[in-house]
């Protein structure tokens, strides 16, 4: 596992699979088994940029497909 420092408390982080909820366009979207860095000290979860971009794209597609 890659170890890094937490951006909140400077604790050590480790890679884990987490569940995250995004609230967009008045709806909730829950994603499970998402790779994130999680602080061992405070529990803060950090997603990398490409992961967030992919999830945001999927949410937009899902929302606007329903509207079409």
Image (cartoon, helix red, strand yellow):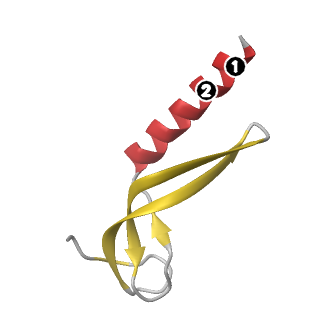
Above or below residue 42? Residue 48 is above
SS of the residue under disc 1? helix
Q: Position of residue 54 (x, y in %)?
A: 44, 37
The residue located at (41%, 54%) in the rendering is 34
59 relative position to 40: left or right: right
Above or below residue 37? Residue 26 is above
Above or below residue 17? Residue 26 is above
Q: Quadrant of residue 13?
A: bottom left
Q: Quadrant of residue 46?
A: bottom left
Q: Where the N terminus falls, by quadrant?
A: bottom left
Q: Position of residue 31 (x, y in %)?
A: 52, 49
Furthest-top residue in view? 68
Q: How many marks?
A: 2
The residue located at (50%, 80%) in the rendering is 8
Q: Quadrant of residue 48?
A: bottom left
Q: Which residue is mark 2?
A: 62
Numbered badge on residue 14: none
SS of the residue under disc 2? helix
15 relative position to 68: left or right: left
Q: Position of residue 10 (x, y in %)?
A: 41, 86
3 relative position to 16: left or right: left
31 relative position to 6: left or right: right
Q: Position of residue 12 (x, y in %)?
A: 33, 84
Is mark 1 in CB contact (under 8 Å) with mark 2? yes
Q: Which residue is mark 1?
A: 66
Q: Where the C terminus falls, by quadrant?
A: top right
The residue located at (48%, 46%) in the rendering is 52
Measure how far apart labels 1 and 2 are at the Cα level: 6 Å
């Amino acid at each position: 596992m890659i170890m890094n420092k937490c951006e909140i408390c400077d604790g050590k982080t480790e890679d884990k699979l987490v569940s995250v909820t995004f609230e967009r366009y008045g709806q909730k979207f829950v994603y499970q088994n998402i790779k994130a860095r999680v602080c061992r000290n405070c529990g803060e979860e950090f997603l990398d940029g490409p992961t967030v971009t992919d999830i945001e794209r999927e949410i937009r597609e899902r929302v606007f497909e329903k509207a079409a």
